[in-house]
Amino acid sequence: MSSPAMASEVKKAPNKSSRHRARELALQGVYQWRITAGEEAQIEKQMHEEKNLGRYDKELFSKLLRGTLSQHANLEALLAPCLDRPLAELSPVEFSVLLLGAFELSQHLEVPYKVVINEAVELAKTFGGTDGHKYVNGVLDKLAPKMRAPEFARRAS
């Protein structure tokens, strides 16, 4: 699945929120980086210049893409204990969705963890393999309590 294929697939869904579209496009950028080992700035520039992307939150897209790629090593370290296999064995889509989800869990505390997980699951359903969304859900369910302990504590009280 190439980035242009993902872009054309995404364009078919006009009812999605601008924030969800930003996540889809950030996923596409992370996927492209994973496959091509491209430069973060070049990928972002290319995405912004792409025509017919529809309505999306450009600021959120940039924050997610830049943040995920600049912190990928730390995010990979956070994810590793939650996985049942090495990161290198994950499909590029699952890897990219998990990286994006881990970034949002760790850095976007204003977004409830349930929303982060749901968005990641939806991305995995749209772009991933048959049961990839189940794997993404399981991994992020393990990671969320570690990343969002205060949020879980509030829920328990």
Image (cartoon, rainbow, N blue to C red):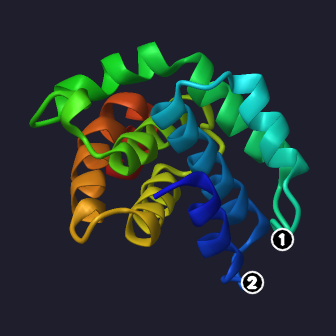
Q: Is residue 155 above or below residue 153?
A: below
Q: Position of residue 155 (x, y in %)?
A: 39, 51
Residue 154 placement, left or right of 80:
right
Residue beneath disc 1: 54
Q: Amino acid at mark 2?
A: Pro
- Residue that numbered label 2 is attached to: 14
Residue 97 vertical position relative to residue 128 in the rendered view, above or below: above
| Residue 130 visible here | yes
Label annotation for residue 94: none
Residue 139: give x, y in percent of width and height: 25, 44
Q: Which of these two is toward me, 156 or 67?
A: 67
> Circle 1: is it few (<14), some (14-19), or many (20+) Cα within 10 Å?
some
The residue located at (32%, 17%) in the rendering is 77
| Rendered image quadrant of residue 148 | top left
Can you see residue 104?
Answer: no
Earlier sequence position, callout 2 versus callout 1 = 2
Q: Secondary structure at mark 1?
A: loop
Mark 2 element type: loop
**Spatial CA span between label 2 and label 1:** 7 Å
